[in-house]
Image: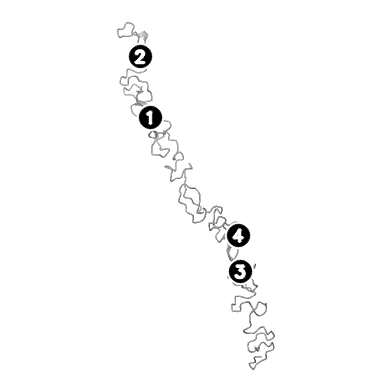
């Protein structure tokens, strides 16, 4: 026994009570004794005051509560982070029912829950949106690069007038003074225009056009008419309305009572 002159060593552990033995009835308890988790005056790591049987188990790789289970092995672990299922493997999970609290991320789980489409890896915060014709919100921010103010189905970046629903590439060009199909040609300047017609020059001003010459236009050009029945566009007296008289005697003069109207 170790006796410092002031007491005895009842448990025969070599240390007297006045000499530092905190329990002189138990030989296993004294300064320098190995610590074991026996729920007595000891813990599993007497070098760390945070480790003892009554300590909460936290995520730190240590058996904090001395129950032989570390971190996720212990059902009573506290402070474990929440992990979310990442079905499409893009590094972003969704905030549905597939949620797990654990010290370490389970396979297929991540710590973010901000994916707006966890079935498609193209959709996640930070995704690039560089196609102005694509209406999808790839980066999950509620905004898209695509715009179509007039709701004609054509993106603003490809529409020559996104405020006019009837104007877009592929629209029918009609006679309205507008470049309906966005090809740079307006009305009759566009070979595909609908509603234009052929007009003919009326050089003699008799209202009848020359059938040998025509111009396609939405409106008649100056000096043109829609008619194409003039037999001599240089002589206003000769046209389908010219009155002809029968010259019975061949003297170049017809009888008033014998006139007829005929095409020239």
Mark whose residue sits in front, 2 or 4: 4
For the residues marked 3 and 4, what is the alpha-carbon distance in whole angstroms? 18 Å
For the residues marked 1 and 4, what is the alpha-carbon distance in whole angstroms? 71 Å
Q: Which mark is residue 216?
A: 1
Badge 3 crowding class, 10 Å Cα cut-off, few under 14, some 14 to 19, many 20 or more, is: many
The residue singled out by tag 2 in the image is: 243
Disc nearer the start of the sequence (3/4): 3
Marks 3 and 1 close (CB-CB < 8 Å): no
Badge 2 crowding class, 10 Å Cα cut-off, few under 14, some 14 to 19, many 20 or more, is: some
Residue 111 image-quadrant placement = bottom right
As helix, strand or loop, the secondary structure at mark 4 comes to strand
Disc nearer the start of the sequence (2/4): 4
- Number of marks drawn: 4
Mark whose residue sits in front, 1 or 2: 1
235 is higher (above) or lower (below) than 222: above
The residue singled out by tag 4 in the image is: 99
């Amino acid at each position: 026994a170790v006796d410092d002159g002031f007491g005895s060593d009842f448990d025969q552990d070599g240390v007297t009570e006045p000499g530092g033995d905190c329990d002189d009835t138990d030989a296993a308890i004294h300064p320098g004794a190995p610590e074991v988790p026996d729920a007595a005056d000891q813990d599993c790591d007497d070098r760390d005051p945070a480790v003892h049987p009554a300590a909460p188990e936290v995520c730190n790789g240590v058996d904090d509560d001395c129950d032989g289970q570390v971190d996720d092995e212990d059902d009573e672990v506290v402070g474990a982070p929440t992990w979310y299922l990442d079905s499409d493997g893009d590094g972003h999970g969704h905030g549905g029912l597939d949620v797990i609290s654990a010290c370490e991320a389970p396979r297929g789980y991540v710590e973010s829950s901000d994916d707006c489409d966890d079935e498609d890896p193209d959709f996640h915060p930070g995704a690039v949106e560089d196609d102005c014709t694509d209406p999808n919100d790839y980066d999950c921010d509620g905004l898209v690069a695509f715009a179509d103010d007039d709701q004609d189905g054509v993106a603003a970046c490809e529409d020559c007038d996104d405020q006019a629903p009837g104007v877009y590439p592929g629209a029918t060009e009609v006679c309205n003074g507008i470049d309906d199909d966005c090809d740079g040609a307006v009305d009759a300047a566009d070979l595909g225009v609908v509603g234009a017609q052929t007009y003919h020059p009326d050089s003699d001003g008799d209202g009848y056009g020359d059938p040998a010459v025509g111009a396609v236009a939405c409106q008649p050009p100056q000096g043109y008419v829609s008619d194409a029945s003039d037999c001599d566009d240089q002589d206003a007296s000769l046209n389908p309305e010219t009155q002809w008289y029968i010259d019975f005697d061949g003297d170049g003069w017809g009888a008033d009572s014998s006139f007829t109207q005929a095409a020239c």
